[in-house]
Image: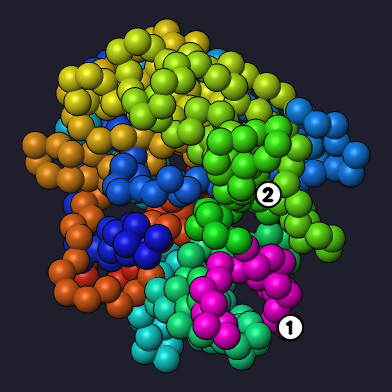
Amino acid sequence: MSTHLEDRLSGVLADAADAAPVPGYDPVDAVRGRQRRRRNRHVAVAAACAVAGATAGSVAVVRAAVATVDHRVGSVASPGRIPDLANLARPAEVGPRGVHRLPAKLPDGSDYTVAQVIGDDRYLVVRSIRSAAPSVYDRRAGTVTDLATPAKLDGLADTTFMMARVVGERVVWFVDGWRRNQGLREAWMVPLSGGTPVRLESMADGAAPRFMVVGNAIAWEQQVPGSAESPGGPRDVIRTVSLDGGAPHDIPGTEGFSLAQVAPWITNQKLATGVTPKSSGELRNVATGERLRWTANSKIQFLRCGPAWCAGTGYGGGVALQRLDGTGYTELPYSGSLAPTADGRLAVGGLKLPSGDRQVVWDQTTGRAAAYAEPRPEGPLKVVTGAPLSDFEPPVLTWRPDGGTLMVLDLTAIR
């Protein structure tokens, strides 16, 4: 667990960033996602919010306000839609209203990274991988407010920070630690304005390090023992808890499902057609009940699908793209991977180009794409970075163009 986390963490502490001119279009180039590092089996979490009395074999549904996904956007490999990766813009040209330039350090001199842009010149930040909780940085006021301490987390010690999200006027986070000689992974919540933290769940072994937000609940992938209905060893289910109170519980009908890269969708593809024999399956929207079928093209492996399109690796080693039904297959001449976000409209990640590794954000609806360099730092890891905070549905991308200033691209501001 910590090995994967630190590997993901180290990737975003950048010393420099490059950017290139305005994008053009080319039907054979594409972007990829930098999320293909070592992953353990439970990196994904899935979204759900159960309704009392849900029937077995179905996904419990919470009626929440969710953006409508146009599944026709899935033709990512169509000529004229894929950016020319030799001529990519600066991030400000893709989302000018979403770019924030922040000081290299917090007012107290500590290192940090941004987990989410809150608004009104406030940011959800994390000081260190050993943080027990996130903090709120008010740049206008020049203040940093820690949302919790180990003492406020019932004495949780030797903590390792996992993930945080702002949900309305509350902050939810996952943290690992030790209490009374027992290793734990816990979910906590606190008002954004501060107050007494509330423990949502102390998880059993096998819980994923990340969660998904759907409506007023969070959900994650949890491994549980085999049952009479499902003998033969552990099984994966989606577990959920409401932020408004109530006991955590498994969502009926989610056995074998995991994160589908874009909330509020879950999938039974288990992240990779190259690892499992499954070549087709189902996406489920746990907010609306909608179901979509996905089918892997015979030439693609390690497939990951959102509700609008899929990406994986072609047998030639390049990034491969396809529609949900397996058509529109294109293998690109660059290695890597691609991850959808923002209802499947944006693609974020990295690309291994002849000019070097580049981190990329691509808006499929406008065709605009941008890149920046993000070399991996040397020396001991000192600061938690945006990678695990944004491994699933990244709200922000962060980089340091001059080795000091922290640049933040708020992906939610790209419209």
Mark 1 sits on what residue?
A: 196
Q: Foreground mark, 2 or 1?
A: 2
Q: Residue type at mark 1?
A: Thr
Earlier in the chain: of badge 2 and badge 1, it is: 1
Label 1 element class: loop
Q: Is residue 262 visible?
A: no
Label 2 element class: strand
* Relative horizontal placement of residue 77, taking residue 174 as reference (left or right): left
Quarter residue 311 falls in: top left
Q: Is residue 42 visible?
A: yes
Residue shown at the point (38%, 41%) measured from the top left: 348
Which region is colored magenta? 178-203
Q: Is residue 261 above or below residue 79?
A: below
Q: Residue type at mark 2?
A: Arg
Residue shown at the point (47%, 59%) measured from the top left: 389
Question: Is 191 contained in the magenta span?
Answer: yes
Which secondary structure is most common in the magenta stretch?
strand
* Relative horizontal placement of residue 175, taking residue 287 as reference (left or right): left
Residue shown at the point (45%, 73%) measured from the top left: 160
Categorize mark 2 by other alpha carbons within 10 Å: few (<14), some (14-19), many (20+).
Answer: many
Q: Where is residue 15 in the image (x, y as percent from the top left)?
A: 20, 66
Q: Relative to the observer, which residue lies in front, 137 or 41?
A: 41
Q: Where is residue 292 in the image (x, y as percent from the top left)?
A: 62, 19
Numbered badge on residue 302: none
Q: Position of residue 343 (x, y in %)?
A: 57, 35
* Relative horizontal placement of residue 415, taking residue 12 as reference (left or right): right
Q: Relative to the observer, which residue lies in front, 276 or 189?
A: 276
Mark 2 sits on what residue?
A: 239
- For the C terminus, which image quadrant? top right
Question: How far apart are the alpha carbons under marks 2 and 1?
Answer: 24 Å
Q: In this view, does 256 lie above or below 156?
A: above
